[in-house]
Image (cartoon, rainbow, N blue to C red):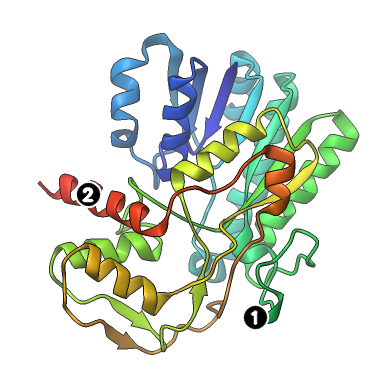
Amino acid sequence: MRALVTGGAGFIGSTLVDRLLAEGHHVDVVDDLSTGSLANLGDARAHAGHALTVHQLDICSGELVEVMARRRPEVVFHLAAQADVRVSVQRPVFDAEVNVLGTLRVLEGARAADCARVVYAASGGTLYGEPEPSELPLPEQHPHHPLSPYGVSKKAGIDYLVAYRELHALEFCALALANVYGPRQDPHGEAGVVAIFAERLLRGEPVTIYGDGEQTRDFVYVDDVVDAFVRAATRGGGLVLNIGTGRQVSVKELARLMGERANCSVAPVHAHARSGELAHSALDPERAGIHLGWQPWTELSRGVDAVLDYLAAVRR
């Protein structure tokens, strides 16, 4: 298979690139390196030879369609995005330029390349809005009601995928991701709480919990997520599928677990709750099990250990 991965130098994207190369596929990476890093592709670039080509390119650029038409990928994995909810609130036009117009460029490139399928990284954390706790974990049938510009722009991507499927027979599978964590997540960039906590604990510093810490998230490990992407290259056509564990973990419990795993007994510091933050989130992965044959397998403690080991190695 010839694959193209947008955002392929990022945390999830580079892990996906490694998996695709390990399975013998040829991979083109498109990344403007604004948040991704070539260091994430270090091993791949050292060993993949002609099986990997990296294009430093903004997905909003008109050159993207030309590159895709020339490289002719069979499957496009579209992970590039403006992924910071706070940035989307402050700069909604910029958010839409990247996530809506950029996605349109990708779809036009896929059409020009006569691509068979686009696998899209949707946002399960923002797609469904603010649900009642009794409704969790959320199935895909729950109303899509995003409450941030980021969530709206990512939902628009799904709507365009549906339109292109009807108009141009371009198949898609959209994966609504829970809170993805794992090695290569930058604790200083668009980081999730696991990477941020790990960095501070390794320094022997207290982690900061905003609010009472009872807010919950569905933490899913990056390797499990990548497995879903690979499966979605040939399955789940025309569907939005939740990729999560279905389990809620409070921020307070996460801090306790990570403190134990890092052997750091420094007590957390509490700060005022951040406005606009979801109180609770969890995604029901049953549909992905049916259509992709997928299920999460990495326990949170094992995943946390991997993050701590990775960041400790980076610091050395």
Q: In this view, does 72 lie above or below 239?
A: above
Question: Disc number at residue 86?
Answer: none
- Image spot of residue 201 (x, y percent): 20, 67
* Residue 243, horizontal then vertical, whole percent: 61, 51
| Residue with the mark numbered 1 | 133
Relative to residue 303, is residue 9 depicted above or below? Answer: above
Residue drawn at x 54%, y 49% as measured from the top left: 296
Instruction: Pick out the residue farthest to the top.
Output: 50
Q: Is residue 57 left or right of residue 291?
A: left
Instruction: Name the kind of residue labelled 2 in the image.
Output: Asp
Of residues 62 and 10, the one nearer the viewer is 10
User: Which quadrant: the N terminus?
Assistant: top right
- Residue 150 seen in this snapshot: no
What secondary structure is found at the residue carrying circle 2? helix
Task: Note whether 172 is above or below 128 in the view shown.
Answer: above
Residue occupying image coordinates x 56% and y 26%: 4
Seen at 59% across and 64% down, the residue is 125
Which residue was labeled with disc 2?
Answer: 309
